[in-house]
Amino acid sequence: MSQLSQLVSFLNEALPERLRGFDSWIDNQKLTPSYKALGNDQYRLTITTYDGVIELDKFPYRQIDPGVVYAMVEVWIIEHASELRSDMGISGADIDAELYDEESALVTITVPLVDELVIAPDENGMIPFMGKKWSVVTPLYDVAESAEIYGADSTGAAVGGQPK
């Protein structure tokens, strides 16, 4: 699932029902080759950067403070955006509000996002690579929950809990 899809899902769950059903799309997409073996028989081929655009038409800015939506976007970025976003120095969101009348506006939020394009072997995959068939997948990362670090002697120091 793309970062934009995740952000849209988050907003649809958090916003009042009358604000759901907004438009969203990807703009200014770029691919940066970034081949890397990720473990678990997965390979990252590229990193894609793009603008995730969210457009709220006829936003009732007098009834609902637009800052609430802006805050939701920032909260999602802080809690859920890819770490690659900060690694690549990607900037914050841009806001454009165009008033229709005294009650409503077109609010456009443009969020720079980044996704990894990762493939894994799949007999039914469509991508020929290294003599196998592959499919695009959501990357699966193994994270160590504990470890022991050894120095010059044989005494280990536990990190992150009790190692097994």
Image: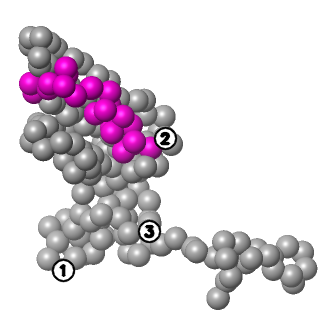
* Marking on residue 123: 1
**Tag 3 or tag 1, which sits nearer the N-term?**
1
Q: Amino acid at mark 3?
A: Tyr
Observer-nearest residue: 75 or 116? 75
Q: Residues within 10 Å of mark 1 (few under 14, many from 20)?
A: few
Observer-nearest residue: 158 or 79? 79
Magenta range: 57-78
Q: Amino acid at mark 1?
A: Glu
Q: Quadrant of the C terminus?
A: bottom right
* Marking on residue 86: 2
* Marking on residue 78: none
Indicate whether residue 47 is drawn in magenta.
no
Give the alpha-carbon distance from disc 2 to disc 1, as whole Å: 35 Å
* Res. 11 image quadrant: top left
Q: Residues within 10 Å of mark 2 (few under 14, many from 20)?
A: few
Q: Horizontal placement of 164 versus 135: left or right?
A: right
107 relative to 128, above or below: above
Q: Amino acid at mark 2?
A: Ser
Residue 54 appearing in the image:
yes
- Measured from the top left, where is residue 145 in percent x and y? 58, 74
Residue at 39% from the left image edge and 37% from the top image edge? 74
